[in-house]
Image: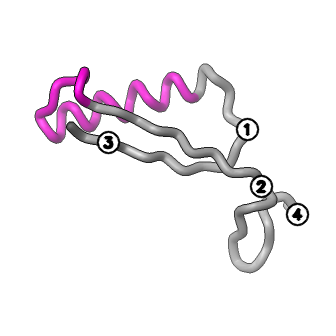
């Protein structure tokens, strides 16, 4: 049973998340030869204040 965790900065719409989990599920199912019913996807969102790149918070951009 494949489990996928997607970590990303908050702010995507539900429609974008639906498309994401569908495509991830399809890719994992095809690549791992696993039934789609056995693929789980967990989206972990973080606020921009908790994410930084090159020493700068994403909220500062």
Q: Which mark is residue 11?
A: 1
Question: Which of marks 1 and 4 precedes in the sequence?
Answer: 1
Q: Position of residue 8 (x, y in %)?
A: 60, 49
Residue at 32% of width from left, 42% of height from top?
Answer: 3
Q: What span is colored magenta in the figure?
A: 17-38
43 part of magenta stretch: no
Q: Are marks 1 and 3 in contact (CB under 8 Å)?
A: no
Quarter residue 34 falls in: top left
Mark 2 or 4, which is nearer the eye?
Answer: 2
Q: Position of residue 11 (x, y in %)?
A: 73, 38
Q: Is the magenta region chiefly helix, strand or loop?
A: helix
Mark 1 or 3, which is nearer the eye?
Answer: 3
Which secondary structure, mark 2? helix
Q: CA distance from mark 3 to mark 4?
A: 33 Å
Question: Which of marks 4 and 3 precedes in the sequence?
Answer: 3
Q: Which mark is residue 60?
A: 4
Q: Position of residue 9 (x, y in %)?
A: 67, 49
Which secondary structure, mark 1? loop
- Disc 2 target residue: 48
Mark 3 or 4, which is nearer the eye?
Answer: 3
Q: Position of residue 25 (x, y in %)?
A: 33, 30
Q: CA distance from mark 2 to mark 4?
A: 8 Å
- Disc 3 target residue: 3
Question: Which of marks 4 and 2 precedes in the sequence?
Answer: 2
Question: Which of marks 3 and 1 precedes in the sequence?
Answer: 3
Q: CA distance from mark 1 to mark 3?
A: 23 Å
Quarter residue 48 falls in: bottom right
Mark 3 or 2, which is nearer the eye?
Answer: 3
Q: Is residue 26 left or right of residue 58?
A: left
Residue at 26% of width from left, 37% of height from top?
Answer: 28
């Amino acid at each position: 049973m494949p489990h996928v965790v997607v970590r990303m900065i908050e702010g995507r719409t539900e429609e974008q998340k639906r498309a994401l989990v569908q495509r991830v599920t399809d890719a994992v199912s095809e690549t791992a030869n696993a039934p789609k019913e056995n693929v789980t996807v967990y989206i972990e969102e973080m606020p921009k204040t908790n994410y930084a790149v090159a020493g700068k918070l994403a909220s500062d951009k």
